[in-house]
Amino acid sequence: MTELATNGRSPSNHLLRRDVRFLGNILGEVLVHQGGRELLEHVEKIREMSKSLRAESSPELYEEFMNTIKTLEPGIRHSVIRAFAIYFQLVNIAEQNHRIRRKRDYERSAGESVQPGSIESVVQELKSKSLPVEEVQEMLSDISLELVMTAHPTEATRRAVLDIHKRIADEVMELDNPTLTYREREKLREKLLNEVLTLWQTDELRDRKPTVLDEVRNGMYFFHETLFDVLPDVYEELERCLTKFYPDEAWHVPTYLRFGSWIGGDRDGNPSVKAEITWKTLNMQRNLVIYKYEHIIKALMRQMSFSTSIVNVSPELLESIRKDSEQMELRSVEAWTNDKEPYRVKLTYMLQKLQNMREDEFKHTNKRYHTVDELLADLALIDRSLRHHYADYVADTQLKKFIRQVELFGFHLAALDVRQHSQEHENAMVEILAKAGITSDYSALGEKEKIELLHGLLGDMRPLLHETAEVSESTKEILDVYRTIQRAQVEFGRDCITSYLISMTQGASDLLEVMVFAKEAGLFRKNKDGSITATLQAVPLFETIDDLHEAPAIMKTLFELPIYRECLSTMGNLHEIMLGYSDSNKDGGMVTANWELRVALNDLTQTAKEHDVRLKFFHGRGGALGRGGMPLNRSILAQPPHTIGGGIKITEQGEVLSSRYSMKGIAYRSLEQATSALILGAYLSRYPTQEKSSEAEWEDIMRGISEDAQTKYQDLIFRDPGFMTFFKESTPLPEVGELNIGSRPSKRKGSDRFEDLRAIPWVFAWTQSRYLLPAWYAAGTAFQKFVDGDASRLEVLRVMYREYSFFRSLVDNLQMALAKADLTIARQYAAMIEDDTIRARIFTLIEEEYATTKKMILAITGQEEILDNSPVIQESIRLRNPYVDPLSYMQVQLLAELRSLRAQNGDDTELLREVLLTINGIAAGLRNTG
């Protein structure tokens, strides 16, 4: 299994081809070792036939290919599936390593030239435009990017498997070492053989659904392995570049880039996320931070051997050591006995203070750190002392990074967002207001009445209920969450939780309900002097197309409420708003969702500007094309520049986490490109490019295209009575729910209604079956309807593609989706539909729309083939497809067998297992899940 990359056309990829060939040969040895030569021969035969079918359609070859798959003995079939799946895992490792190699090669050979998309390139550009240092400082103070890890079930790979992947990646990278001897190279090969064998004998399927705390650990893995070191390195590079081009300034870049998390805080539709789980999550995050700080301090102790016999340390350092020795005893840390090495003595006390944070007995004493500012003060004291005796280099190289890490991660590691569905809040409010004797049926009130009531309650500091009042379990849980947030802000610092997200926000009352609950827990209060203190912000999540339309009016209502506005002023007049890409796409289709999100961004920004409020937009993007997925830097630059002034948050989830952040080199490059894009976006917001006179006309055109696309999309999804049957029977949707990849149910309320199906399994299932329907369906009809056979109208779309960035991004994303979709394979899945009429009608609609979309994309771009504009990706998809195809054909066969058995009230755990293995394999092959 060595040919996937050996056909690459670029000679610069010879090292990638070497690595793939090397790993493929090792896998071949493992297959023979584990299953005999017969297994390898089966795999090779299927691979060759699949490749030939891609090259030339032949009914005879197709029949032979299908017969070969269908006649595989179950034991062999199981191993064949795993062979293809593991091959893709190895190829993905090789490709990730090659990305790191390419960056290093560029830096090695480029000399003084600057890599495009790098931090240096954007700072150089600012300097070339003669931007004064004061304005650069202002820009850096204004920019903000928070990347938020989520526990959405889109990561199909187990942590144990990812650990093996990391070891393989490290060892493959060592192949580039030119100093390796022949024996060392052979030893390296033996280690890789051992790892691939271990991978083969490791179960890639989870035997149970992960718990929420399992998901918390999975998220923390990326902090532990890469982000704790990589994030400060990005800051260091930005400061290096600023110093290079603006040398007269002493740069310390404000905190503009950090990570947050939903894992352990997102309770929308997940009954397992209780207040207790949120508290445990915050403790786990703090324990990791303390562990990391302890290791850094121990390393500093080994390095900082400065002796007062030779240097004069600062008097304040000696005084702080004296105070430490009087206030605390060294219990779990060994005392440093050489008093002439004061840095080591000081660090010993700091280490003890950190360790004491784990013990409740020190909670109210000065023998531990209570705030991150106390730790930063100790580090600043050491820094000043080092510079006092001219050890500047040591301060800059050994201490500076630690200070940055403390600034970034505090004692909470990452800000935890809490999320809950708006209906849950209303249910609790109904019960509480009835018990308080305020209104017997809150839910029966109109929106205006609810707003008046809730606004009045915010101004009344009396609690609605006594803390011990008896309420239902669900209402108690709602209230406990707010009490936990208040307790957490005291224990872990105010920054640990500051945002409370409200799913399916449909009115101003949804935000006011959250603020009333916050008041009950002391997170919002009106002080005796009339001023307001608030430490938690209610964040609306606008998800459906209708909600996006209503969003500006909802925010206008809130901005004009006196108490709400006063609350907002305590938060710097900055309001966070989340926009959902997944549900808007599921609701209206790809074209309409993208357009409506853009309209909402612009309208909300204008509404806020009229009320002197800045907005921080939280973009709920998924990993897949059908859920707004794209590279991080592109997702930043895709926003209208004037909408990023208050900062940006973006979800990072599923396969995006492991592909972006499991390796330090790739994590660094992704965050470097994001920083470059963020600074460029900030510059463009200050100095917008000349607005084209045609832009207003183009937006009118897009509005019409969006309406036509939405009609076409909803005609199929919502108005065709056979659609849900088609979807369930021609995709592995039912079986996806049995793949243990997330703690949250795949459906809200356990319902079978389309409206209650989560967007993630919706996209996952279409991707597995190779339709990728949510990422392109209805675009072709909308474009064609606009052109309507008029060559001049087609020319307008061509000009828009060249000059209108939004339209170009839209069309290029459609190209990517069309290239990854494969209706020849999808037809195999459609064959599972029992009702011939439904199958024929809907598949024909999909097939015709695919052809129309492809035709229109090629006409607009002027290309001969889809993705001619991106030949590297085009070639990658072309080379991967023959290896994914066998997994798809086998998945169809297995699904048919399993469903037939279950229709007769039977079951087969091994058959299900093989289905789930194909799901993992296809996910690895397409590099997409949900």
Image (spheres, grey):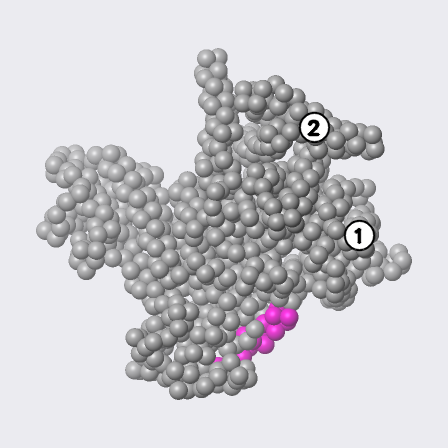
- Residue 393 falls within the magenta-colored stretch: no
At label 2, counting other C-alpha atoms closer than 10 Å, the crowd grade (few under 14, some 14-19, many 20 or more) is: many
* Residue in view at x 47 percent, y 23 percent: 194
Which one is in front, 519 or 233? Answer: 519
Instruction: Please provide percent x and percent y for residue 651.
Output: 52, 54
* Residue in view at x 72 percent, y 54 percent: 726
Marks 2 and 1, how far apart at CA: 30 Å
- Please report whichever mark, 2 or 1, sits nearer to the chain's N-terminal start: 2
The stretch of residues the image draws in magenta is 546-565
Instruction: Please provide percent x and percent y for residue 768.
Output: 65, 45
Q: Secondary structure at mark 1?
A: helix
Amino acid beneath label 2 = Ile
Left or right: residue 864 versus residue 740 is right
At label 1, counting other C-alpha atoms closer than 10 Å, the crowd grade (few under 14, some 14-19, many 20 or more) is: few
Instruction: Please provide percent x and percent y for residue 786.
Output: 82, 61
Q: Which residue is mark 2?
A: 46
Left or right: residue 421 versus residue 914 is left
* Residue in view at x 48 percent, y 84 percent: 441
Q: Quadrant of residue 585?
A: bottom right
- Residue 557 falls within the magenta-colored stretch: yes
Instruction: Please provide percent x and percent y for residue 646.
Output: 50, 63
* Residue in view at x 39 percent, y 73 percent: 472
Q: Which residue is mark 1?
A: 836
Which one is in front, 205 or 52? Answer: 205
Q: Main SS type for the magenta part?
A: helix
Q: Quadrant of the N terminus?
A: top right
The answer to whether one can see residue 529 in this image is: yes
